[in-house]
Amino acid sequence: MRSFPGWRVVGAAFALGAVAALGQAPLGWWPATIAGLAGLAWMLGRGGGWIGWFGGAGYFALALNWIIEPFLIDIARHGWMAPFAVVLISFGLALFWAVAAEAAVRLPRPALGFSVTLTLAEFARGHVLTGFPWAMPGHVWIGWAPAQVAALIGPNGLTLMTVLIAVLALTWRWAAVALLAAAFAFGFWRLDQAEPAPMDVTVRLVQPNADQHLKWDPQQAQIFFDRAMALTAEPGSPDLVIWPETSVPYLLDTESGLLPAIARAGQGATVAVGIQRVDGARGFNSLAVIAPDGRLVDTYDKHHLVPFGEYIPFGDTLARVGITAFASQLGNGYSAGPGARVLDLGAAGRALPLICYEAVFPQDVAAAPERPGWLMQVTNDAWFGTLTGPYQHLAQARLRAIEQGLPLLRAANTGVTAVIDAKGRVLDSLPMGEAGKLDTPLPAALAPTPYARWGEWAALVLILALVPLALGRRRVDPSAQVR
């Protein structure tokens, strides 16, 4: 990597990265993202990987500011770690941007090459060490018409489009304007297309609003459970009732009266509840499907777990050499389920369950063994605070709907509980911090999108098409002018 360019230069890169993060939910200021990324591309010649590292750190520090919230649940015990968490995750994730910038600056056309290398780096960020594709640059379009392009080229294609618009704005402004206009035009066209009528099925989404610092208190836990039961039993005729992640404060037990009690509250509806279960020494973050007669008809175990939050990486491996404190197989954290699967929910059809974090990963949705009729997310976003994290999580759920052409129903503990149609539009929702229920007809699915059929291949083709341009003969390039 090149020599350190000085604190003023990397400070400017950090600031530009923070500007680029303003496009993420809840603000959605995508022009700021374009400007920030364009500025970073323009600065590449001043420091290569250093520009990418500090620019990425600024981007992630602002976009992922909610990362401090879990450490504030028990501030006396964990609050001191919050600043370190922000610094470590920001500069850690920014290493992907550093590699992208250093690779780009070695190309004949660094700025144009940056659109390719940063897209590849973001793809890697979504997969390396189980992945963390949160706050990708392409996410800034969620809620805007260009997000519909994800139905063609997916989230990595959206990132490529975003960075390409930014770098084209430096020298080929007409091309940037044309690409942006085409994205808006396609989005408006797709949103205007007719779609099937909703299914003749009513789903009730329950939001008990259990504060995280009280959620597992023995007395408060019963209050929250009774609240969920009361919301389930309110008048109406739902075919399916959905509770959020870990909303049942008891372990799954088919021998007790727990499941029949929940079924009675459902008054003839199937009830799907977030619950923990154990099998031997292993624990699972699960979804249980309860029939109207109180029988347990199916379960799904979360398979894409949060590293360090739900399990310790390599904990089971360490147990083989006698270090057992981190082993999931011995009950020290959740164990991963076998993988994605589709649940038969009777009148509500076949749905792919996603527990919390799993909705962040397009590959987890694509891993379904068959195409479901809809997507069902249960989550506990109380961990993420109330300012940015829950809204970014909701935005990514909306993108999964667009990518697949499938509706997504979302039951969140503290919010945002939402009904999302197959084009990613929020049809109805419950706000943050309020207990309540939401009865909704089940939106209809669309035909499989090109992205649902071909996955990341379309984005890969676009990347390969840009490689010869990035390797072409150097012309006037902003990054070269500042070397």
Image: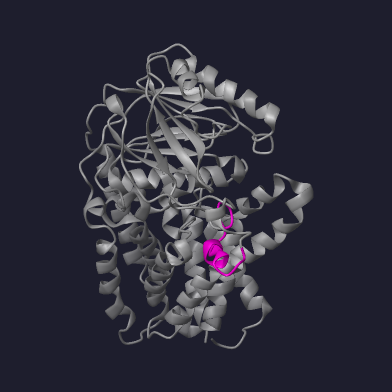
Q: Which residue is at the front of the view, 76 or 463? A: 76
Q: In this view, does 113 lie above or below 82?
A: below
Pinpoint residue 90: horizontal percent, then vertical percent: 60, 64
- Drawn side of residue 85 relative to residue 75, left or right: left
Pinpoint residue 320: horizontal percent, then vertical percent: 54, 67
Magenta residue check for 202: no
Q: Which residue is at the front of the view, 329 or 123? A: 329
Asked which quadrant contains residue 354, the reply is top left
- Drawn side of residue 70 relative to residue 236, left or right: right
Asked which quadrant contains residue 124, the reply is bottom left
The span picked out in magenta is 308-323
Does the rendering let one see residue 143? Answer: no
The residue located at (47%, 68%) in the rendering is 38
The residue located at (27%, 57%) in the rendering is 455
Does the rendering let one see residue 308? Answer: yes
The residue located at (43%, 44%) in the rendering is 301
